[in-house]
Image (cartoon, grey):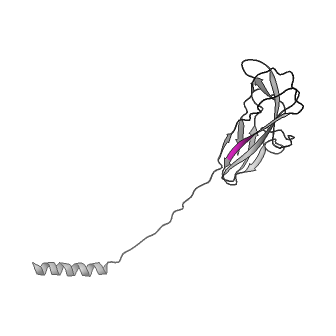
Amino acid sequence: MFKKVLVAGALIACTSSAVQASTTTTTFNVTATVISSCSTSASDLAFGNYDPLAVGAAVGTTTVTVTCSLLAPYSIGLSIGTNGVAINNRKMKITGGGTDLLNYGLYRDLSHTLNWGITTGLGGDTLNLVGTGLAVGSTVFGTIPAGQTGASVGSYTDTITVTITF
């Protein structure tokens, strides 16, 4: 029996050295497409107390924060609000069911000369930026013009919709 095992081992040794290993190869691509993506949040703009007999306008600011994909162009637009007529004629309405309105404005600049609107593109009235991949805050400058003596005492409110176009 020992001779049979020895012969079988010798045959295996001979045949394994005579067989050559073969290989074949191929390739495949790994792909992905980075898309433009944005998210946004905003804080409330609270003017505080407004005195219609004061000489100067009431001013306030808020921040719209946007995070967009790196190098993605985007614009930030602000609606006219629920009571407004146009971007240069926004209005807060007295709470509690009354009809009194209080005029106010929202601007893209500290000097309150560039109304902040919703129109994108050439000649638009939005803020146009390019994404950094990080959260970027943009200041909204607000004013309530002085001398609105026809407004009744009470709390006034409006709702602005922020639209990010990318």
Answer above or below: position of 154 versus 39.
above
Residue at screen point 46% across, 69% down: 25
Residue 32, quarter of picture: bottom right
Figure check: 83 above or below 22 = above
Residue 70's quadrant in the figure? bottom right
Which residue is found at the position 11% from the left and 80% from the top?
A: 2
- Comparing 54 with 63, the one in front is 54
Q: Is residue 58 visible?
A: yes
Is residue 139 toward the left or the right of residue 146 in the image? left
Of the pair 82 and 65, the residue shown nearer to us: 65
Residue ranking furthest to the left? 1
Q: Number of callouts in the render?
A: 0
Screen quadrant of the N terminus: bottom left
Q: Position of residue 28 (x, y in %)?
A: 51, 63
Residue at the image point whose x is 21% and y is 82% from the top: 10
Q: Is 16 positioned to the left or the right of 90 in the image?
A: left
Q: How far across and down, in percent of the image, does residue 53 sit? A: 88, 26
Please provide percent x and percent y for residue 71.
70, 54
Question: Can residue 60 be found in the magenta stretch?
Answer: no
> Relative to 111, is 103 above or below?
above
Residue extent of the magenta highlight? 62-66
Residue 102: x, y in percent? 81, 26
Residue nearer the viewer, 39 or 56 = 56
Q: Is residue 86 visible?
A: no
Instruction: Please state if 94 lies on the left or on the right of 30 as rendered.
Output: right
Q: Main secondary structure of the magenta part?
A: strand
